Amino acid sequence: MISRSYANLLDLANGNFPAIEEPRRKMLPRTMTVPGVLTELDDDQARSVSSDEQSTVLADRLIVVANQLPIKAVREVDDTTGESSWSFNWDENSLYKHIKDGLPEEMEVIYVGSLRADVDASEQDEVSQILLERFKCAPAFLPPSVLDKYYHGFCKQHLWPLFHYRLPFSASHGGRFDRSLWEAYVSANKIFSQKVIEVINPDDDYVWIHDYHLMVVPTFLRRHFNRLRMGFFLHSPFPSSEIYRTLPVREEILKALLNVDLLGFHTFDYARHFLSCCSRMLGLEYQSKRGYIGLEYFGRTIGIKIMPSGIHMGQIESALKQPDKQSRVHELEREFEGKTVLLGVDDLDTFKGVNLKVLAMENMLKTHRRWVGRAVLVQILNPARGKGRDVEEIEDEIKSSVSRINQEWGSPGYTPIVLINQPLTLAEKAAYYTISEATVVTAVRDGMNLTPYEYVVCRQGISGSDSSNSPQRSMLVVSEFVGCSPSLSGAIRVNPWNVESTAEAMYEAISASDFEKQMRHEKHYKYVSTHDVAYWSKSFFQDLERTCADHFRRRVWGIGLGFGFRVVALDPMFRKLSTSVIVDAYGRAENRAILLDYDGTIMPQSSINKRPSKEVISIINRLCNDPKNTVFVVSGRGREDLAKWFSPCEKLGIAAEHGYFMRWQADKEWETYAQNASFGWMQMAEPVMKLYTEATDGSSIERKESALVWHFQDADPSFGSAQAKEMLDHLESVLANEPVVVKSGQYIVEVKPQGVTKGLVAEKIFARMFSDERRADFVVCVGDDRSDEDMFVMIGDAIKAGIILNKNNRSVFACTVGQKPSRAEYYLDDTVEVINMLENLGDISGDSDSDYVGSS
């Protein structure tokens, strides 16, 4: 049964998800003892989305979610009775069918997807039951109105062209963005997700979602199950950021994909484009660690997997063994006797470059006339997956070119180009692969394209046979714009748009020596036979397990509305700072240390006016006037600005430029980290920074008394990051013998004296209090960026050394601003919460101060 749909699709598409009742999930039993009987799981613990307890079920399950189930559905009519019934069989040509080959034998695989058949609403329950019992498939039935707009509309008119680098330049070429199609896409994804929810056990199951049809399913599932172990694999190209940014719903789709744990792509180019989009649109940067690429997103590390899919070796070899294949091979050998066959097998699609291939064949015959009458291009056209004027136009163009070339270059008994425009079985295609000297793929953009893989295996023959044991030959001409190109290092790579170079590649392929053909074939067959679909699924699933290893250890919760929803994952010890807890500890303490960062902590980063407000000055004065308190502002800003802004706070301590300058109170002298320090290195570093500033639009230099900072937050993100890395290496080389450190931060590169850190400031403050016999028994330290982490680390060291007295682990509060990974144990959401917390502490000090004055 399909769960109830949203009443307002526009709200849905805009990301305004109304609260809905979670549907009952039909659990597939681990051992099905009675065919057709499904157990209902009513256990509240199993239904809980926030349960921290591991399930006692031993075997995990994998739920594979794809647009279409790997099932063939045929409506059969009984000739005698005239009654019709459904017949279902596995679709052996489906990649998803063979995913289980790479998984542990005991792992159960459940499929969720739609059927390639129209099932009447009255039959849907019965069909669902049959598929669930016999095939462990849960069909999602889309209403016709939604299906057409979802698949033929948004998927094929917007996503498919855009992901293949075609922009909608006009209403007649590509069409304009239609929000109703986006609404249908979201609605369809919602239906798929509800079907997953019906069969899932969130504590034990893995979910693997496939392809561009279902890119917002992760958000729907993550809203229900914060800890769900979920992966996604994109089988199409992912376009460069310049192309992807034109999509009006670009951020909604990006954020939805970031709700998975592992994202898979066929090639590094596709992954790089996705990461570039995340950087430019969401400000996220990836890191590579021990060979794995990870993207940090609200405390979660989203793995990036680069692994081209493969073919099913057993399926191809089974086709090679069929008797009709052998007979067809003999027929083709007689038909093309004395001729050299080049083969093309492509879908009837605007991006397959079939007409470019045909034109390249013509050019080869013109340039190398000795092959006229000897070279034949056999072009097999698979049925189009989409529909529309574009498909009709490209088909007419191919037929017209083939007819013209055959008429010009053909002769009795010789047809240069043989066009097969009808569906062929795998066995029939295998026959053509077997008799072809080379296969040519000239797609102008393609996600993977497994045609070269199939060709290589067919040329090898059946494993263990006499033919496979003898040396075999094959040649590949492959477009550099298809996903399989990087993995086929022995192929002749071409730019399909350059018809002349493609023609030369085709000539080279059929003219190569037998030895060269043999060497290239061996190289390809070794790769293709070992990197099959089982290897691909095994590798992806292993990475998914590794990425999700700590799911049940970390504390997680969902925040955000609509497609802005995301899950925040934090260490179990990392928790929000409770006002009541800190107020209670503050009231009982005798010697307090309060250390505050400035920008991003008590002053919002987005604020244009960086001067502290009267409210902040008043709160800090109340804290400073309490004789039990030692209060410091520890900032990277210069001492002149800080001294001027906080001049009303006479008892406030200030540490400027990360602690290079330090003043205990307004009437005290500034202390410096190193007396009589030489800053001659600035004359060496500044010219280098100026060089990069001139070459990097949007960058600037900030000169402090003790440091130089290069800012590039307003530069192009990719270029700025690349320049920053280059500058870092350049400065480290130039300043190798100087007493300075070169550090990179968030959109900065900084050069400062060695040993200057906020951690050192904290150490000095605690040591002074300890020497004055005022050992701190209460510490609150608040900061928002990397430099503040040094203070958090120092606090832990001071506790171990006994310099700080941490009563019952309830009197030290290292707190970061924002929910993010940190060495601090506490967090507050923003500067507003920081000010409120300080105000509460100031109120206590104000009350106690009144009592103190009165008693004196």
Image (cartoon, helix red, strand yellow):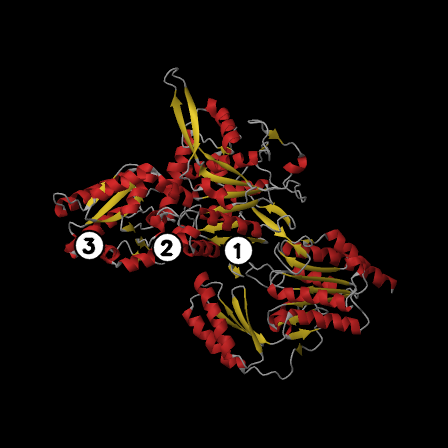
- Which residue is identified by label 1? 295
Image coords of residue 675 (percent x, y): 65, 82
Pointers 2 and 3 in contact (CB under 8 A)?
no
Foreground label between 2 and 3? 2
Q: Nearer the viewer, residue 378 or 671?
A: 378
Image coords of residue 403 (percent x, y): 17, 42
Foreground label between 3 and 1? 3
Task: Give the quarter of the image for residue 756.
Answer: bottom right
The span from disc 2 to disc 3 (Cα, nearest Å) is 25 Å
Image coords of residue 831 (percent x, y): 63, 56
Q: Which mark is residue 336?
A: none
Element type at mark 1: strand
Please name the residue shown 53% across and 56% down the image: 294
Image coords of residue 318 (percent x, y): 39, 41
Q: Nearer the viewer, residue 613 or 826?
A: 826
Categorize mark 1 by other alpha carbons within 10 Å: few (<14), some (14-19), many (20+). Answer: many
Q: Is residue 704 visible?
A: no
Pointers 3 and 1 in contact (CB under 8 A)?
no
- Which residue is identified by label 2? 524
- Which residue is identified by label 3? 364
Element type at mark 3: helix
Q: Nearer the viewer, residue 364 or 581?
A: 364
The span from disc 1 to disc 2 (Cα, nearest Å) is 33 Å
Single out the residue that lies furthest toward the front.
466
